[in-house]
């Protein structure tokens, strides 16, 4: 199983076309602006809480994680793919 790290809106679009339905997606950096689109398209979604806060956004309705959680997710998956189109 692959963990998908999404850093932009374009990255989310590319990721959603290619990822497996049960594979988790993490929104980081400017990717957090894509929370509404990601929620509509994907069930296994995580969002970096620090990146939301840095952009003045809230994590209502999403599973917010910190860097410790991100490391745990990365270790738990055989592959990690970054998306930043």
Image: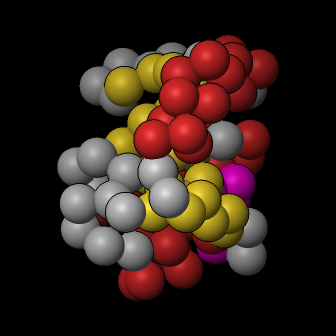
Q: Quadrant of residue 57?
A: top right
The answer to whether residue 74 is above or below residue 3 is: above
Asked whether the viewer can see residue 47, the reply is: yes
- From the image, which quarter does the C terminus lie in? bottom right
Q: Quadrant of residue 9?
A: bottom right
On the image, the x and y values in percent for residue 31 come to 64, 49
The answer to whether residue 72 is above or below residue 74 is: above
Is residue 11 toward the left or the right of residue 44 in the image? right
The answer to whether residue 16 is above or below residue 37 is: below
Choose between 29 and 25: the one closer to the eye.
Answer: 25
Q: Residue at x 66, y 41 (%)?
A: 28
Choose between 65 and 31: the one closer to the eye.
Answer: 65
On the image, the x and y values in percent for residue 69 come to 53, 22
Provide the residue span drawn in magenta. Answer: 6-10
Q: Quadrant of residue 79?
A: bottom right
The answer to whether residue 23 is above or below residue 48 is: below
Colour scheme shown:
secondary structure
On the image, the x and y values in percent for residue 36 come to 39, 47
């Amino acid at each position: 199983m692959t963990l998908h790290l999404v850093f932009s809106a374009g990255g989310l679009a590319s990721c959603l076309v290619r990822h497996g339905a049960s594979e988790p997606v993490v929104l980081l950096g400017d990717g957090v602006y894509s929370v509404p689109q990601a929620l509509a398209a994907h069930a296994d979604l995580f969002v970096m809480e620090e990146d939301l806060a840095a952009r003045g956004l809230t994590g209502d309705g999403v599973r917010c994680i910190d860097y410790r959680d991100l490391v745990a997710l990365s270790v738990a998956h055989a592959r990690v793919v970054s998306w930043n189109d």
